[in-house]
Image (cartoon, rainbow, N blue to C red):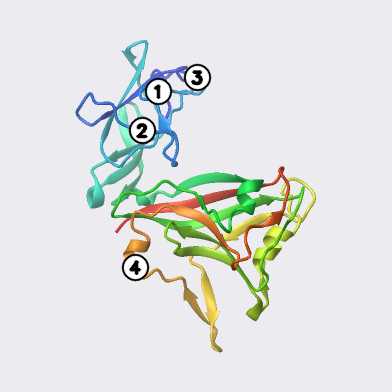
Amino acid sequence: MAVAYSGAAPVAGATISVFLAGTQTYATIYADTLNTPLANPFTADVLTGLYLFYAAQVPYDIQVSVDGSPVDVTPGVPMIVASGSGASRVISLVTEDQGEQVVLAQVLGHSGAFVQRVTVTLDDAQIKALPTTPITLTPVPNAGVRFKLVGATGILNNHAGVYTNIDATYASLQIETADGSWLAVIGNDSSVSLGDVTTWFNTNHDPASGGTGGILDWLVPTAFPVGANGWLTPILTTSKISVDGQALRLAMDNNGSGDLTGGNAANTFKVILYYLVEAL
């Protein structure tokens, strides 16, 4: 959302106050999907007038002011407006034309219709410790809600030093729920000559220059060919408990062989996760 006087340039440093709807009680708000606390009130961008915050799915009143005076939203700048909750929730993308709101797009039902994105970058120590220390990627959803994985991208830069001690008999690198239920995975399996985890960590990757790349697309839903007829079977999560209120994380199974070795302090592994918020 952007702040400007009607018909004018963006306002530098407008004050944004977020209240629980119908009250003067300041709401708890966050700077990102990892629930990093954000002061309330807070200041819009001093150059663009843009502002953004994350919060629980309840109604809010937003007050915008400059030196204590109300400020209008620039006509023509789209805003996301939400009302209601649960199955009755309506989320609209609206703009303004000659003082009238115009709905550009509208989603009915749960707000999970909007894809969420979160980016987490692992350092060398975190990469090597993945077999014993998973990395949490998302906040913990409320009870009765799950994060439905849409897809994930891995970007590995191990140009300064590849990783070793990857079990060739069996290993897996996966996006999973906090209780260990797989959602997307690559694997090593010597019984079928599969060595994707070794290829990922032990090949020289440098997305910036040199190396052989370093981009991993986790496919969702993951499926495995089974039997002579080649049936494709998705990962089945049979228990609601496995997904209800569960954060998503990056984890690795190294078949009891311990943490990875090798690497270099300059290495990084960026994970970009896309997910929906879905009521159960």
Q: State which mark lies toward you, 3 or 4.
A: 4
Residue displayed at 38% across by 55% down: 246
Three-letter code, disc 4: Ser
Three-letter code, disc 2: Ile
Q: Whole-Å distance between the Cαs marked 3 and 4? A: 48 Å
Q: Say which mark, if any, is on residue 42.
A: 1
Q: Residue furthest right?
A: 210
> Residue 187: x percent and y percent?
60, 68
* Sequence-wise first label, 3 or 4: 3
Image marks 1 and 4: residues in contact by CB distance under 8 Å: no
Q: Residue furthest left?
A: 22
Q: Judge the density around disc 2: few (<14), some (14-19), many (≥20) Cα neighbours within 10 Å.
A: some
Q: State which mark lies toward you, 1 or 4.
A: 4
Q: What residue sits right under mark 3 in the picture?
A: 46
Q: Secondary structure at mark 3?
A: loop
Residue displayed at 24% across by 26% down: 25
Q: Whole-Å distance between the Cαs marked 3 and 2? A: 20 Å
> Residue 270: x percent and y percent?
61, 47
